[in-house]
Image (cartoon, rainbow, N blue to C red):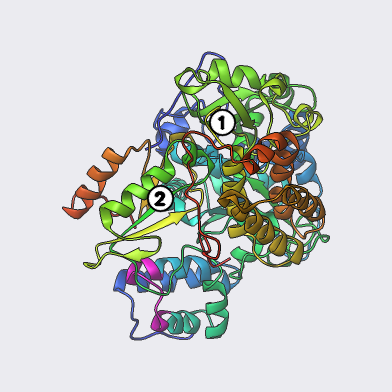
Amino acid sequence: MAAVTNSIFTPAYAERFDKLATIYPMKRSALVPMLLYAQDDLGYVSDEAIAEISVRLDLLELDVRGVLSYYSMLRTKPAGKYNVQVCTNISCMLRGGFELLDHCKKELGIGHKEVTEDGLFSLEEVECIGACCWAPAVQVNYDFHDNLTPTKMTQILTDYREGRGKDVK
Amino acid sequence: MPTLVSHPDEVKVISRRFGAGAADIDKYVELDGYKAVQNAIENGPEWIINEMKASGLRGRGGAGFPTGMKWSFVPKVSEKPKYVLVNGDESEPGTCKDHVIFLHDPHSVIEGTMIAGLAIGAKTGFIYLRGEYRYLLKIVEKAVADAYAKGYLGKNIFGKEGVDFDIITQSGAGAYEVGEESALMESLEGKRGVPRIKPPFPAVVGLYGGPTVINNAETIASAPHILLMGGEKYAKLGSERNGGTRLFGISGHVERPGVYELPMGYNLHDAIYKVAGGVKDGKQLKAVVPGGSSCPVLRPDELNVGLDFDQMGKAGTMLGSGGIVVLDESVSIVEFALRTIRFYQHESCGWCIPCREGTDWLKKTMTRFHAGGGTKKDIDNMQYLAENMMGRTFCPLGDAAAMPMLGFYKKFRAEFEEYLEGKRVENPLIQITPVGQPALAGAH
């Protein structure tokens, strides 16, 4: 592995990346999780992150970008501190997913893939997040909230706004 | 947190540890955990594969391929290392069963992976979870670390000289397509998750070019239970040629949605009306999507059918991934079809043209149709399009998009025609998108 001396990532993540590059039969296998962890650390996958990951895994930046552009959870622009992902797929739609999305749009004053002015929230309409039997469901960052109603959603947003929300990484 | 449900008709095999705190390794061992894998080490690969074949277990990811047979296809001698790959990239709309397994019984997936490894002679297993399941990945990572600490994983497992097994956990980053086995391997090799052409099949040339067994998480988690109770006994729980039990996620307009474990061949009508408590708020049933969003829809008069791969096939639909979605009378099939095709259009990876273009044109036409700009010819055109996608793509995503659409056009044609005449449901769910604005533009 090419040595990375002054990593742009926080020490805990840099250490994790050092290990990730060694556990697979082929180093490149670490790419997808590494991109996601890089995003968890920085809030998005920046050009600097792409450069460092390509050095860490002996890839061309082009290879990294090619993979990055494929996966829908990865982004190259910052999202809000709390990324509210509302599922509107079939099971959630039947139990009020779209209503919830509209409610979030009103509450936050933003649309799909937009960020609030204070940078606290971003909103995304997402495809099935695997919580169909507890629909409608929303993920805030990696944290699941299910069996929601607009009233419950308002409470959840308030909790996050006031720093009481979980921030799973 | 997903709530657990139960019903007297359930036969609890794979779900018997749910809610018992089995994510903790000591609790898992107390509940017969890691016994099956020790039996497997004692009795050898041939015994494992015979038990699996006797169990009649068929792939729970949706294709229903007999698991024992799949394992037996792996060549005994291989120059390259062999691998086991667990598919936990559960993304089919309507499906949330693996979610519950990872949450409540992660060790059963680990133990199943070890058993599959012993059966085919692999030393390494991968457990791949979708990116959205980060909190579950942490649970699985902890379970793997605990198993290493106890000496159940690593070198000389359970103190047996020369028996080694390693497990690596892996996270995806959001792509439905990666649930297809060859795309899963591509993703695990750090590439775009696009499918590979088959043959060669993964059992011969798979991950890193080595022979690979790829199983759905529920299939893998069933293996320890099968070895403990014996393949034949497990088979008897289910119906003919469909051994055992499986998890069914019943969602949509039912009184008690949730993940239930029912015997294979259990009646679909009973699953909805008895187990899940019938249609919500006493409304009339309109339609049922019986196995995840890619399965052709059933009308209320077609529900007297057993939930197994063969009977569902005879009924002109599929058992799929066991995600039963129930629609009441208030739902517009046009809207439901639009939402379904939106999903497949968004998730088509773009690797091959019939799916990339087909899903896109279906979505465009459906969007225009939904906005009130449809014509009678559109219905025929869309049906023609979907028929032309079937069987013409690298992987089953093209079929998965075409099949439900064909089901809607054939079984609810009258509703599409009434929609043309201006008939609408009382409470439409989807706002009309002005044509020209892409809904849900995504990376793939």
Q: Nearer the viewer, residue B395 or B120?
A: B395
Q: Is residue A71 magenta?
A: no
Q: Gap in Å between the C-alphas at discs 2 and 1? A: 21 Å
Type of amino acid at the residue the image marks with label 2: Val
| Residue A103, numbered label | none
* Location of mark 1 (residue): B327
* Location of mark 2 (residue): A86
Neighbour tally class for label 2: few under 14, some 14-19, many 20 plus, Cα within 10 Å: many
At mark 2, the secondary structure is strand
At mark 1, the secondary structure is strand
* Residue reaching furthest to the left: A162
Type of amino acid at the residue the image marks with label 1: Leu
Left/right of residue A33 with respect to residue B125 in the rendered view: left
Q: Main secondary structure of the magenta part?
A: helix
Residue at screen point 79% across, 22% down:
B240
Q: Is residue A46 magenta?
A: yes
Magenta residues (range): A38-49
Note whether B317 is above or below B171 in the view shown.
above
Note whether B236 is above or below A38 in the view shown.
above
Task: Tell me where residue B262 sits by quadrant.
Answer: top right
The quarter of the image holding the C terminus of chain B is bottom right
Contact (Cβ within 8 Å) of mark 2 with mark 1: no
Left/right of residue B367 with respect to residue B241 in the rendered view: left
Chain letter belonging to callout 2:
A
Note whether B195 is above or below B278 in the view shown.
below
Left/right of residue B330 with respect to residue A85 in the rendered view: right
Q: Nearer the viewer, residue B383 or A42?
A: B383
Residue B161 visible, this orientation: no
Left/right of residue B178 with respect to residue A137 in the rendered view: right
